[in-house]
């Protein structure tokens, strides 16, 4: 007798309604046991829908992998019942798995595809006239897709979570599977013991599975005999052509290229088994797929994250609305492009191909006053062609993703424009994200090529960064090979005009990564048209004429120089630490090109003022010739702007507001800030003036509106430009991002108003039409005092003489938080903790008087946690967690980045 699992006890399964549990007898047609009747267990919400009188849109066929069972899909089964537009969900236990029959046979991939067909025929799914959508995980991916290929008349969409449909036998399978297949380990690890089962069930983040959930997953595999299916699944892994199921895998992997149906992937990127390379392979085979990556989820992504809500949102767009959110957004956005003439970024360079005046200057990394290298426009054009021809010869093609790991300067500028000329997609992620953040970003972007200096190539080899490597430094052949590089830029010799391709306006051009100050850094995709729109917005807003001189103390703007027709220079500084820029380094760079425009980060501004005493007379004169100063990334105090103004007396100082997704959005000058502040004061202050940070009015080509907040602190679907209405800031412009990279859920939220980008910032207009930023939407506090935004209270707190910088955060339940101020003091506090009674009283009184907000407590820290890129964006979520612990009487240490 073959041991069978005990009778299902669904009442004991957390998250499952016992009414969902069913069994069915199915006659097998698989070669291994044709004609034999097998008992299948499955979850099915169909009867519950029928009882409720609800007609499903269609059926989701959910297929688990190894070593899970239908319990994996409990949230989706439940979601099908509660969704506005319901779906029947059938989640199977494959034979030899879960509570289905143990057959005693050795089932291969082809058998399991056939088994699934037997099951769907037996339960009547083959005769349905409604859409059928597959949903799968792990081994279920191959099996469900094999079934889909044999049931093309039924399948209307395919959806997947962490899985693989193809493994290149020239590459090693993941380490965990290598171990499980090792003959010395295989039988013991998969069948005789619970090792494989336990390891898999521990592949959940956020503290692991709940104990009862864990027990439920493990229950049908309580003895070695009941785990025979786990061993068989592992043994059948098609790691190479000698594996019995390798040819079946190939047939399915190639066959799905012809599946012309919508596809949706939800992927946990911390999965050590089904790594991002398998996701990318699926994207190549199903290029129509929408993808969302969960950066904090692992193999059991459905236990780490809510995958049901996005799944039903996606299905609703495709099968109920008949139009996707992406289609609606593109249609609405088209109005912003109809009258815009497209001039590619590269045209600013090609138009000056015969110009022998300076284009790019590199300052020495050792002597801040010395010029290390420089290129004329003609020389830069020649260098761009040399690199474009060389990269093309190495296989870089239109659409190829190229990660540029090269410091700012003439070399990076030439590489960037070479990629634009080819039509390749530039991947730009700050080294300031740190090794962990940078690795996560690059594995998300999956570049095809990595062009980097030696240290970047070493990091790529050590950390497993993706992409064929090309050395940017001049290296000897042995060193190039040692770093895993296939070529070096020095080997490129063809300087003829590159003519192999002319990019189209809507081709992808760049993936730019956010700073990571509001969560894991997100890849933001720009097209050629949108990059050109960014150039146009900056050029027209600030009247940067061709021939201008631009000092880029914020590295990305050095790359815009050639497109603007401006001579650009990057001062001596550590680009990963903007506050290392000194006044003398800035002045030396300005003098090198007789600059009239300067762009620096807020953190750099503070250090420039702090080191201004070191300026020589000549350097002061160089700064006096500057006519425009731009600083974006965080608000700047009026006192700091005043100090900067004394260094650049002829300059109009601007603090544009924007973000990686849309830069810039609005602009305001120092003079306008002072006027706005004045308008908010006096006996009859202007409506909306004085509360928050004034960021001015929309830049060239942009329009800004407000989505008002409701009582729960959530933005409305309607937008307004009425003064005094606080809500989420939304923007539309030709230079707003195309999309987030493989972040479907995030993109859907950001374009919930078609044609507009929801910034995640909150603010309002004043009566003069100026925009005031009040903080981040994520930092809005729903309190007993009403819906509160943090910035006004922070500004008020900073007026107390002992306070250097402040952040107001909420502690307690999200639905009813309590506002607390966390401050840096001057002088610095000896240790973090509660503020003195005197300081607490002063801050609370100041804030209550000016804003009406009653702070519950005041805490002190030596330094706020900030982002790396700007050294100024305070991580309020981290502060909130720390403050909650501190006020609860627990010992609390500030979390490290």
Image (tube, grey):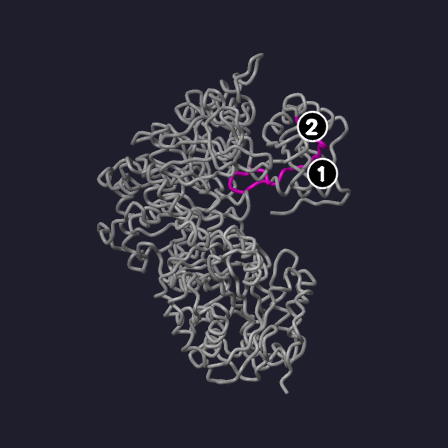
Q: Position of residue 609 (x, y in %)?
A: 53, 28
- Residue 455 seen in this snapshot: no
Q: Determine whether the residue tagged by mark 2 lies in a helix, strand or loop.
A: loop
Q: Which residue is mark 1?
A: 832
Residue with the mark numbered 2: 854
Q: Is residue 702 left or right of residue 880?
A: left
Q: Position of residue 837 (x, y in %)?
A: 77, 28
In the shown orientation, is residue 373 left or right of residue 820?
A: left
> Image height check: is 431 above or below 178?
above
Q: Dominant secondary structure of the magenta stretch? A: loop
Relative to 890, say whether 718 is above or below: above
Q: Which of the 4 image quarters holds residue 375? A: top left
In magenta segment, residue 873: yes
Q: Quadrant of the N terminus?
A: bottom right
Seen in the picture, residue 521 relative to 33 is either above or below; the reply is above
Along the line of sight, which residue is nearer the eye, 39 or 224? 39
Q: Which residues are magenta?
A: 853-875
N-term mark: 2 or 1: 1
Viewer-nearest of discs 2 and 1:
2
Give the answer, above or below, for where 65 lies relative to 443. Answer: below
Q: Foreground: 291 or 415?
A: 291
Whether residue 547 appears in this view of the structure is yes
Query: How many marks overall?
Result: 2
What residue is shown at x 61% (from left), y 58% (from top)? 205
Q: CA distance from mark 2 to mark 1?
A: 22 Å
Give the image location of residue 746, x and y in percent: 49, 47
Residue under the point 39% across and 24% down: 627
Q: Helix or strand or loop: what does disc 1 sit on?
A: loop
Q: Is residue 397 magenta?
A: no
Q: Residues within 10 Å of mark 2 (few under 14, many from 20)?
A: some
At which x and y percent is residue 77?
56, 60
Question: Farthest bottom residue?
Answer: 1
């Amino acid at each position: 007798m073959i041991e069978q699992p005990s009778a299902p006890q669904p009442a004991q399964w957390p998250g499952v309604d016992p009414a969902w549990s069913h069994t069915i007898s199915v006659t097998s047609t698989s070669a291994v046991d044709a004609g034999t009747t097998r008992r299948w267990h499955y979850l099915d919400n169909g009867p519950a829908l029928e009882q409720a009188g609800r007609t499903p849109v269609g059926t989701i066929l959910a297929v688990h992998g190894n070593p899970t069972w239908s319990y994996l899909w409990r949230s989706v089964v439940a979601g099908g019942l509660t969704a506005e537009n319901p779906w029947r969900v059938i989640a199977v236990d494959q034979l030899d798995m879960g509570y289905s029959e143990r057959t005693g046979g050795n089932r291969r991939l082809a058998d399991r595809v056939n088994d699934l067909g037997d099951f769907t025929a037996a339960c009547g799914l083959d005769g349905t006239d409604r859409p059928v959508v597959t949903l799968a995980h792990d081994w279920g991916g191959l099996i469900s897709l094999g079934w889909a290929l044999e049931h093309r008349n039924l399948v209307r969409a395919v959806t997947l979570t962490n899985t693989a449909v193809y493994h290149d036998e020239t590459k090693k399978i993941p380490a965990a599977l290598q171990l499980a297949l090792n003959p010395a380990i295989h039988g013991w690890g998969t069948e005789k013991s619970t090792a494989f089962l336990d390891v898999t069930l521990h592949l959940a983040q956020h503290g692991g599975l709940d104990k009862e959930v864990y027990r439920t997953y493990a229950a049908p595999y309580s003895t070695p005999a009941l785990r025979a299916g786990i061993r068989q699944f592992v043994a059948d892994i098609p790691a190479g052509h000698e594996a019995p199921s390798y040819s079946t895998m190939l047939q399915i992997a190639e066959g799905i290229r012809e599946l012309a149906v919508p596809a949706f992937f939800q992927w946990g990127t911390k999965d050590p088994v089904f790594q991002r390379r398998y996701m990318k392979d699926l994207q190549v085979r199903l290029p129509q797929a929408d993808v969302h990556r969960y950066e904090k989820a692992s193999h059991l992504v459905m236990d780490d994250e809510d995958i049901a809500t996005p799944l039903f949102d996606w299905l609703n767009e495709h099968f109920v609305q008949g139009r996707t959110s992406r289609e609606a957004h593109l249609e609405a956005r088209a109005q912003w492009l109809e009258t815009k003439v497209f001039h590619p970024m590269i045209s600013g360079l090609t138009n000056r191909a015969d110009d022998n005046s300076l284009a790019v200057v590199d300052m020495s990394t050792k002597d801040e006053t010395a010029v290390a290298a420089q290129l004329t426009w003609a020389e830069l054009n020649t260098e761009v062609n040399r690199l474009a021809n060389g990269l093309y010869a190495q296989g870089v093609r239109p659409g190829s993703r190229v990660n540029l790991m090269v410091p700012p300067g003439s070399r990076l500028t030439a590489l960037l424009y070479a990629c634009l000329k080819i039509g390749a997609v530039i991947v730009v992620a700050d080294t300031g994200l740190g090794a962990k953040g940078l690795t996560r970003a690059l594995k998300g972007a999956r570049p095809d090529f990595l062009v980097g200096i030696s240290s970047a190539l070493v990091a790529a080899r050590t950390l497993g960064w993706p992409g064929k490597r090309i050395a940017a430094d001049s290296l000897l052949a042995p060193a190039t090979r040692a770093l895993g590089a296939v070529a070096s830029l020095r080997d490129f010799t063809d300087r003829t005009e590159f003519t192999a391709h002319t990019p189209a306006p809507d081709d992808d051009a760049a993936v730019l990564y956010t700073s990571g100050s509001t969560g894991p850094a997100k890849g933001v995709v720009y097209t050629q048209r949108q990059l050109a729109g960014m150039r146009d917005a900056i050029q027209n807003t600030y009247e940067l004429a061709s021939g201008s001189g631009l000092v880029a103390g914020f590295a990305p703007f050095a790359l815009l120089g050639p497109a603007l027709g401006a001579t650009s220079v990057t001062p001596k500084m550590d680009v990963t630490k903007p506050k290392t820029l000194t006044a003398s380094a800035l002045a030396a760079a300005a003098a090198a090109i007789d600059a009239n425009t300067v762009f620096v980060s807020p953190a750099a501004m503070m250090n420039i003022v702090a080191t201004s005493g070191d300026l020589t007379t000549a350097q002061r004169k160089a700064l006096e010739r500057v006519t425009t100063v731009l600083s974006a990334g965080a608000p700047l105090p009026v006192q700091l702007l005043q100090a900067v103004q004394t260094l650049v007396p002829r300059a109009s100082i601007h603090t544009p507001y924007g973000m990686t997704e849309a830069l810039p959005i609005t602009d305001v000058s120092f003079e306008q800030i002072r006027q706005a502040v004045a308008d908010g004061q006096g006996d009859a202050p202007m409506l909306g003036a004085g509360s928050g940070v004034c960021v001015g009015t929309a830049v060239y080509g942009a329009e800004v509106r407000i989505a008002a907040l409701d009582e729960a602190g959530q933005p409305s679907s309607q937008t307004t430009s009425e003064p005094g209405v606080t809500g989420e800031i939304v923007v539309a412009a030709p230079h707003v991002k195309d999309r987030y990279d493989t972040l479907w859920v995030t993109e859907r939220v950001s374009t919930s108003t078609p044609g507009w980008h929801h910034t995640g910032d909150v603010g309002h207009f004043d009566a003069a039409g100026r925009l005031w930023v009040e903080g981040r939407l994520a930092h809005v506090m729903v309190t007993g005092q009403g819906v509160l935004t943090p910035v006004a209270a922070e500004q008020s707190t900073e007026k107390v003489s002992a306070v250097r910088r402040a952040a107001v955060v909420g502690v307690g339940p999200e639905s009813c938080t309590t506002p607390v101020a966390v401050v840096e003091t001057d002088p610095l506090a000896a240790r973090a903790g509660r503020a003195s009674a005197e300081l607490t009283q002063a801050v609370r009184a100041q804030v209550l008087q000016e804003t009406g907000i009653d702070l519950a407590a005041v805490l002190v820290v030596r330094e706020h946690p900030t982002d790396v890129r700007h050294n100024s964006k305070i991580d309020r979520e981290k502060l909130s967690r720390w403050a909650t612990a501190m006020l609860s009487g627990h010992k609390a240490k500030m979390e490290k980045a």
